[in-house]
Amino acid sequence: MLASRRTAKNQSDMAGWKQLNQDIADCRKCPRLVKHCQKIAVEKRRAYQAQTYWGGPVPNFGPTRSPILIVGLAPGAHGANRTGRMFTGDRSGDWLFRALHRAGLANQPQATDRKDGLKLHGCAITAVCHCAPPDNKPVASEIANCRPWLQQTIKLCRPQVLVALGGLAWTQVIQFAEHNQWLNTKPRPKFAHGGQVTLPGNRCLLGSYHPSQQNTFTGRLTEQMLDDVFSTACQLARLNHLST
């Protein structure tokens, strides 16, 4: 009886996750972002002229009920907006998936397209904004429109550890924690690379610099620094066996 209930619960969670991702992909709440994503998909970058761009909201990537949830900023114009999968097809993703592979959270270090065989283990990836914004800067109303997707993602995923890539992702997770009465401290915890905030239910928020070219090219973020964040995440989520 208990096993059958667990099976039914798992099936319900998977169905809910699938529906959430479909709802995200179908979203058209932000006209500016819809127009921008479609414009990029038509103009394309010279190197990708032969490819068909996704050109719309990019759903979450990874299994539901993941102990670790990675929260990014937004899809890259010629990365995830092209491939249709979070952090796939650009240099930020190259850095992220190499780190996840080294931590035992991904089966391979490369991410080129949705059919490349990449699978995540024990983690999932979402974003504050699911559409590629102009200049990589969503405005406040666009972040607000996407906030319900982040809330639903966290509730379905039920992570033990949330890894915020950058200050904006950190702020949105903090706001979620306050809204759900997980956090009630003043002043709010400030973002810092390697920063940690303990949340109820043995949960934890970790901060990391975003693996953007601005950070990786300048040396503000190194591969060792990113490895250290995911090593800590695995330990806190009791997934340290994955990296052995």
Image (cartoon, rainbow, N blue to C red):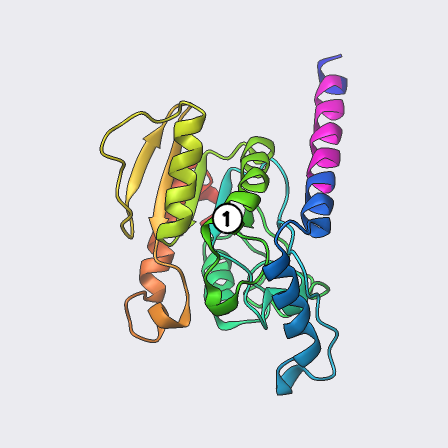
> Residue 76, position in %: x, y?
54, 66
Residue type, label 1: Ser
> For the stretch drawn in magenta, what is the main secondary structure?
helix
* Residue sitting at the far bottom: 46
> Residue 202, position in %: x, y?
40, 26
**Magenta span has 101?**
no
Q: Which residues are magenta?
A: 5-18
**Magenta span has 6?**
yes
* Picture residue at 54% right of the left edge, 35% below the top: 151
Asked whether 119 or 148 is in front, the reply is 148
* Residue sitting at the far left: 187
> Residue 237, position in %: x, y?
44, 36
* Picture residue at 35% right of the left edge, 76% below the top: 217
Q: Is residue 158 left or right of residue 236?
A: right
In the image, residue 38 sits, relative to residue 51, either above or below, namely above
In the image, residue 171 sits, relative to residue 6, either above or below, namely below
Mark 1: few/some/many CA within 10 Å (<14, 14-19, 20+): few
Quarter residue 161 falls in: top left
Quarter residue 122 falls in: top right
Quarter residue 110 falls in: bottom right
Which residue matches tag 1? 141
> Residue 222, position in %: x, y?
32, 66
Q: Can residue 194 be seen from the camera position used here?
A: yes
* Picture residue at 59% right of the left edge, 51% below the top: 120
Asked whether 66 or 190 is in front, the reply is 190
